[in-house]
C-alpha cells in the first residue's frame, strides 16, 4: 500500500518534470560537417557514389522563390512556387546514415507561408510539422537519412494549399545512396558515369474562354481559378523540369556510347511511366528503394505519384533518344519529353537498315 503510494508519487513527479518521457538525444554531435552546393536540375550536386568514412552532417539550404514561370513556347505562364527557383527543386544527395541539416528560408518578399515534407524523414509529417516559415523567416531541421533510395520532398502547408503548392512546382527529391553504393540483383557494384534528375510536373492553368490561358500576377491571385481546374484532375501541361522543351533542343541531355547514365525521376502528385525510346532500363528501382534489388531490362517503368524512382542505362548506339512519359498524350500533347543526344560509333550488329524506303517491289 505504502509502496504503491511512493511509486505513484514518483511517477507523478516524473511526469510533471517531463523526465518520464525524456526525448532521446541525436547522435549527430561531433560528426564531420560538409556543405552541399545544390545545383539546378537536371544536374546532380557533386557527390561520391560510395561513402568515404563515417556518416557526416550534410548542410543544405533551400530558399523559397515565388516567381512567374513560362511553361511552353507560346509564352503561357504559371505563378510558380519553388525551392531555389527551379521546378523541380534541387536534388539533394547523401548516403544512408548521414544527417541532413536543412535550412529553409522564406524571403520577406514572398506572399505565402511554406514548409517542407520530405518522404525520407521519420516523424513530424516528414518535417512538415517543424518547418512552417512565413515570409521573412527561416528554420533549420536535422534529420537522419535512415533508408536508402530516392524520395520526393514537397511543400505541404495544409488543406487545399498542399496540392496548390505542389502543382505550382514546389517539390523536388533527395537521393540517399547505400554507403557502399548501388548494387545489382546479385550484389555486384553498379556505377554511373553521369546522372540526371528529371522532375515531372503537372500544371493546371485556367483558360480565358477564348482559346488561351489566363495570366496572374501572384500565386494568391491565381489560387481560386487554379483550384477549380485542379478539381478536374486534367492538367493543362505535363512537363519535365518546369517547361515544355526544358530538356530538348539546346537543352538536351547528353551521353556517349559506353557511358552509364542514372536517370532519377520524380513526380510529386501524379503517376507516370518513364520510357527511353531506343533504349532500356538496364537496372530500375522503380519504387525508389535501393535496399531492394533493381529490376532489369525494363521497357517502361512506373513511378507512383508522390514518389521518385531511378533507372540506370548504358548507351550502346549514338543518335537522338527520347526519354518520355509513355502516356503519349502527356508526352507529346502536354510536354513530358526530354531528348538525350548520344555520340559514338554506330553498331550494325544491333540495328541496321538493310534497304531504305522505296517503291514496293
Ligand atoms: Cu509552399
Image (cartoon, helix red, strand yellow):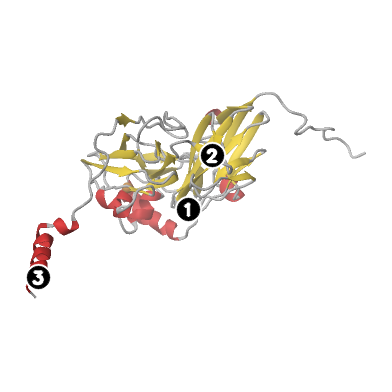
Q: Is residue 201 visible?
A: no
Q: Residue furthest bottom?
A: 1
Tell which of 224 and 314 is nearer to you.
314
Label 3: few (<14), some or many (≥20) within 10 Å? few
* C-alpha distance separating marks 1 and 3: 57 Å
Helix, strand or loop for disc 1: loop
Residue 275 image point, x, y percent: 60, 44
The residue labelled by disc 1 is: 305
Cα gap from disc 1 to disc 2, whole angstroms = 25 Å
The residue wearing badge 2 is 183
The answer to whether residue 118 is visible is yes
**Which residue is identified by label 3?**
3
Image-based side of 66 in relation to 279, left or right: left
Considering every residue shown, the one lying at the far right of the view is 361
Disc on the earlier residue, 1 or 3: 3
Quadrant assignment, res 354: top right
Q: Image check: 344 left or right of 134?
A: right
Q: Is residue 294 left or right of residue 117?
A: right
Q: Residues within 10 Å of mark 1 (few under 14, many from 20)?
A: some
> What x and y, as percent, mark residue 279?
65, 38
Amino acid at each position: 500500500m505504502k509502496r504503491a503510494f511512493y511509486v505513484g508519487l514518483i511517477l507523478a513527479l516524473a511526469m510533471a518534470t517531463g523526465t518520464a518521457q525524456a526525448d532521446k538525444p541525436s547522435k549527430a554531435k561531433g560528426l564531420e560537417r560538409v556543405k552541399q552546393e545544390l545545383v539546378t536540375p537536371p544536374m546532380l550536386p557533386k557527390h561520391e557514389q560510395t561513402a568515404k568514412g563515417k556518416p557526416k552532417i550534410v548542410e543544405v539550404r533551400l530558399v523559397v522563390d515565388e516567381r512567374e514561370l513560362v511553361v511552353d513556347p507560346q509564352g503561357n505562364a504559371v505563378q510558380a512556387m519553388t525551392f531555389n527557383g527551379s521546378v523541380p527543386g534541387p536534388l539533394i544527395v547523401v548516403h544512408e546514415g548521414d544527417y541532413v541539416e536543412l535550412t529553409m528560408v522564406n524571403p520577406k518578399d514572398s506572399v505565402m507561408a511554406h514548409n517542407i515534407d520530405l518522404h525520407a524523414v521519420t516523424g513530424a509529417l516528414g518535417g512538415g510539422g517543424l518547418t512552417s516559415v512565413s515570409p521573412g523567416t527561416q528554420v533549420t531541421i536535422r534529420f537522419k537519412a535512415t533508408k536508402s533510395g530516392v524520395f520526393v520532398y514537397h511543400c505541404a502547408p495544409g488543406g487545399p494549399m498542399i496540392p496548390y503548392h505542389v502543382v505550382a512546382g514546389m517539390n523536388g527529391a533527395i537521393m540517399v545512396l547505400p554507403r557502399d553504393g548501388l548494387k545489382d540483383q546479385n550484389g555486384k557494384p553498379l556505377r554511373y558515369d553521369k546522372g540526371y534528375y528529371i522532375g515531372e510536373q503537372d500544371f493546371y492553368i485556367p483558360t480565358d474562354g477564348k482559346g488561351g490561358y489566363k495570366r496572374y500576377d501572384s500565386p494568391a491571385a491565381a489560387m481560386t481559378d487554379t483550384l477549380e481546374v485542379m478539381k478536374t484532375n486534367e492538367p493543362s501541361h505535363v512537363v519535365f523540369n518546369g517547361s515544355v522543351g526544358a530538356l530538348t533542343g539546346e537543352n538536351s541531355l547528353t551521353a556517349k556510347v559506353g557511358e552509364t547514365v542514372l536517370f532519377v525521376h520524380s513526380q510529386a502528385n501524379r503517376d507516370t511511366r518513364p520510357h527511353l525510346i531506343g533504349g532500356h532500363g538496364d537496372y530500375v528501382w522503380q519504387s525508389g528503394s535501393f535496399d531492394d534489388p533493381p529490376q532489369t531490362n525494363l521497357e517502361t517503368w512506373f513511378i507512383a505519384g508522390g514518389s521518385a524512382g531511378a533507372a540506370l542505362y548504358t548507351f550502346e548506339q549514338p543518335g537522338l533518344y527520347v526519354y518520355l512519359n509513355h502516356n503519349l498524350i502527356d508526352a507529346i500533347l502536354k510536354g513530358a519529353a526530354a531528348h538525350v543526344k548520344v555520340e559514338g560509333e554506330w553498331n550494325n550488329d544491333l540495328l541496321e537498315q538493310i534497304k531504305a524506303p522505296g517503291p514496293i517491289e
